[in-house]
Image (cartoon, rainbow, N blue to C red):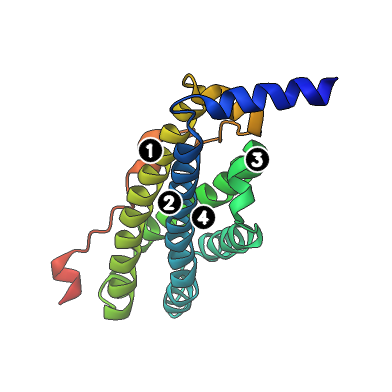
Amino acid sequence: MKKLSTLIVLTLVLSLTGCGYNNFQSSDEQVKASWSEVINQYQRRADLVPNLVKTVKGEAKFEQDTLTKVVEARAQATSIQATPELVNDPLALQKFQQAQSQLGGALSRLLVVSENYPSLRANQGFRDLAAQLEGTENRITVARNRYIKAVQEYNVTVRSFPANLTALALGYKEKPSFTVENEKQISTPPSVSFDTEAAK
């Protein structure tokens, strides 16, 4: 009896004009594409870290604690498998987000500390890597914003009538979005400024 009633509800839902099924497919694919771009940018940042650390290690007496935190944060961030399924699991997404936030914070700290080392700031390799890192942080912000918008549009479809009936019948659920503990800190890329005199 339960199966029959479920089948009747499903038939009614799918027979409704604008049931939202195609919208779900489209918006779900947009969420996946946006998520892939977020992952690409986070990976780009992770790939910059080894070269940045190697360059900084060449600076005599550089704060080892700062370097260690960057290396550990990168290891933690890259240890989490960022699969497409992660976007459907609020706890897994939160854990991933925290790891990425820690890496971002560690890198920001490294750049701030580097201001105390004129010879490091004058190193062209370091300057290039820092500029690439700043550009990557900007790309991360853009990719995250696109992902947040894609999730928002998907979630609106899940909650809107009559698409919400289709969502109920086919098991489509709202997707978690990024939550930001300190929105200003996350949305602001690391500040990279070099004293022109030191660079000469």
Whether residue 113 can be seen here: yes
* Of pointers 2 and 1, the one earlier in the residue sequence: 2
Residue occupied by mark 3: 89
Question: Can residue 115 be seen in this snapshot?
Answer: no
- The quadrant of the rendering that contains the N terminus is top right
Does the CB distance between marks 1 and 3 fall below 8 Å? no
The residue at which mark 1 appears reads as: 149
Q: Identify residue for label 4.
A: 103
Q: Which of the two labelled residues, at mark 4 and mark 1, occupies the earlier sequence position?
A: 4
Q: Quadrant of the C terminus?
A: bottom left
Task: Tell me which amino acid carries mark 2.
Answer: Ser
Circles 3 and 2 in contact, beta carbons < 8 Å: no
Which percent across, then down, holds residue 112?
Answer: 36, 55
**CA gap, disc 1 and disc 3:** 18 Å
| Frontmost residue, 115 versus 10 | 10
Looking at the rendered structure, the secondary structure element under dot 3 is loop
- How far is the residue under mark 2 from the one under mark 1? 9 Å
Q: Which mark is residue 34?
A: 2
Q: CA distance from mark 3 to mark 4?
A: 21 Å
Where residue 51 sits, quadrant-wise, is bottom left
Residue in the picture at 40% in, 42% down: 186
Q: 90 above or below 112?
A: above
